[in-house]
Amino acid sequence: MAPDAASRYRSTRGGGEVCDFAQALLNPRPPDGGLYVPEGLPHFGPDELEELHRLSYLQLAERIIAPFIGDALAAGELAGVLARAYRGFEHEEVVRLRALDGGTLHGGPLHLLELFHGPTLAFKDVALQLLGTLLDDILSRQGQRRLILTATSGDTGSAAIEACRNCARLDIAVLFPHERITEFQRRQMTSVQQDNVLCLAVRGDFDDCQNLLKAALGRGEALTGAALMTVNSINWARLMAQVVYYFYAGLRLDQGGGVNFAVPTGNFGNIYAGVLAGRMGLPVRRLLLATNRNDILHRALVGNDYSRVQVQGSVAPSMDISIASNFERLVHFLTDAQTTARLQAEFAESGVLALPDAAWQCARELFASSRWDDDGILQAMQQGQQRYGVVLDPHTAAALAAAQQYGDEHPTAVLATAHPAKFSEALVRAGLGEFTAEADTRLATLRERGERFEVIDPDLDSLQKALGGSSLGGLG
């Protein structure tokens, strides 16, 4: 691999020119409709892994991320960017790794990797706080401004708002499905009263929000007169940031035979960061994918059936998707650009994608997949409290269920992606109502702030009108 291959980016579909990190950050969708991936990945050998094991989270992040950034930042600047990005986290080490009481699976220790200690209590803070800081820094150097347009099924929106609200060079408009997310999730977004923030409730489901987002980005600056971009999980910088916590946990848990990671999965970005970590040298044994009744990923891995179906509401709304936006990166990882372009074109036309058999078999070796309906998730929430003494949100509970089903004699880290306070309704349904006091307190605080949002139809005309009537970057 060339020394700078990790900081040169190409489309998963092979079209267009090579770009650098700043270009991939600011324009995350290549012209051919694919997704950016680096030409190569850095690799850490055994001696380097031992050195990385001794580093703090911020030091580790600097070592992992630096190769992907290249010369987008001057030498020594990345450490300061990381310090600013993570200064608002409640935990000194950004994330928290802890053993579960009595937590062994077939002899292997069970740990919880808590990723929810950021300002909005969700794992997406880890990536988005860094992304916002990088964007503001690079845009300031270039004398530019961006309007961020993003769609959320629950947690991305509030995390993106929190990452951008104090950035001088950024405005943000968030699309979320009207009456399809929890009150807590909605108010985390709509209670923000700053002029560079706009919240739009879309009549429809999350896929309607995603489709509207893609259509708007396709129109680009012609839609509003502002330069548009997105910070959804298709932005490479988010994956880059997520790789770090796999290394942080894996290096602390590995006993010589590798580590399993159980991951609640919706758009496939979080778990794909685990694929990258394994390719970069981390001893990843198996990635345990957990999803809900919206099981396109489970069907793809178990039966090679990646086919679009109607979204069903569930107790774990952040996994309520019909298309996993980062799955294309796995297709490219397992095949090549030409095959990826062909398969994605077929999927766009038919709504069905089947991997070549050899690629599918490789995927089955990387992942163990599981699907959990609402009853199974609620039971896992109960087991978390009764067996391990922890209160879990429904997404993390699905990952715990996957760990219990597939764990072996090796260490397993369950990725805890949200604070349970964000899902008090699910706690009540699981018979854990006595643990909602913190959720009630946090929600009461949000209610005191009031709300500001607009309900729109899922079409470009409605979106354009809402943006034009807003205070974002002088658009109104």
Image (tube, grey):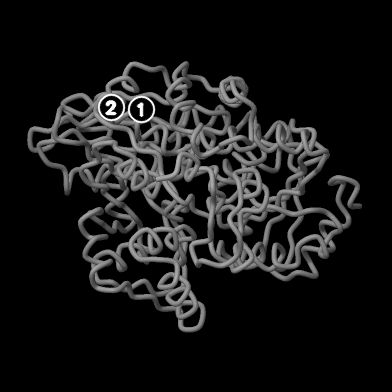
Instruction: Tell me, yes or no, if residue 162 can be seen here.
Output: no
Depicted 320 relative to depicted 246: above or below: below
How many other residues sit within 10 Å of disc 1, few (<14), some (14-19) or many (≥20)?
many
* Rendered image quadrant of residue 250: top left
Give coordinates of residue 218: x percent, y percent. Answer: 70, 67
Residue 303 visible here? yes
**Res 266 quadrant in image:** bottom left
User: Disc 2, disc 1: CB below 8 Å?
Assistant: yes
Question: What residue is drawn where x is 24% and y is 71%?
Answer: 303
Amino acid type at mark 2: Leu
Question: In front here: 58 or 109?
Answer: 58
Whole-number angstrom distance, CA of label 2 to CA of label 1: 6 Å
Secondary structure category for the residue under label 1: helix
Q: Which residue is drawn at 21% across and 32% down?
A: 110
| Amino acid identity at mark 1 | Tyr
In which quadrant of the rendered image does the N terminus lie? top left
Q: Which of 383 and 277 is in front in this view?
A: 277
- The single residue placed furthest to the bottom in the displayed view is 350
Front-most of residues 406 and 6: 6
Element type at mark 2: helix
Residue 85 vs 269, above or below: the answer is above
Rendered residue at 74%/54% (across/down):
228
How crowded is the residue under tag 2: few (<14 C-alpha within 10 Å), some, or many (20+)?
many
Classify residue 389 by image quadrant.
top left
| Residue extending farthest front | 2
Give the residue pinned by disc 1: 248
**Quick one: 446 or 242, which is closer to the camera?**
242
Question: Which residue lies under the disc numbered 2?
Answer: 251
Direction from residue 74 to residue 255 in the image, left or right: left
In percent of width and height, residue 9 lies at 54, 52
Q: Is residue 441 above or below residue 139?
A: above
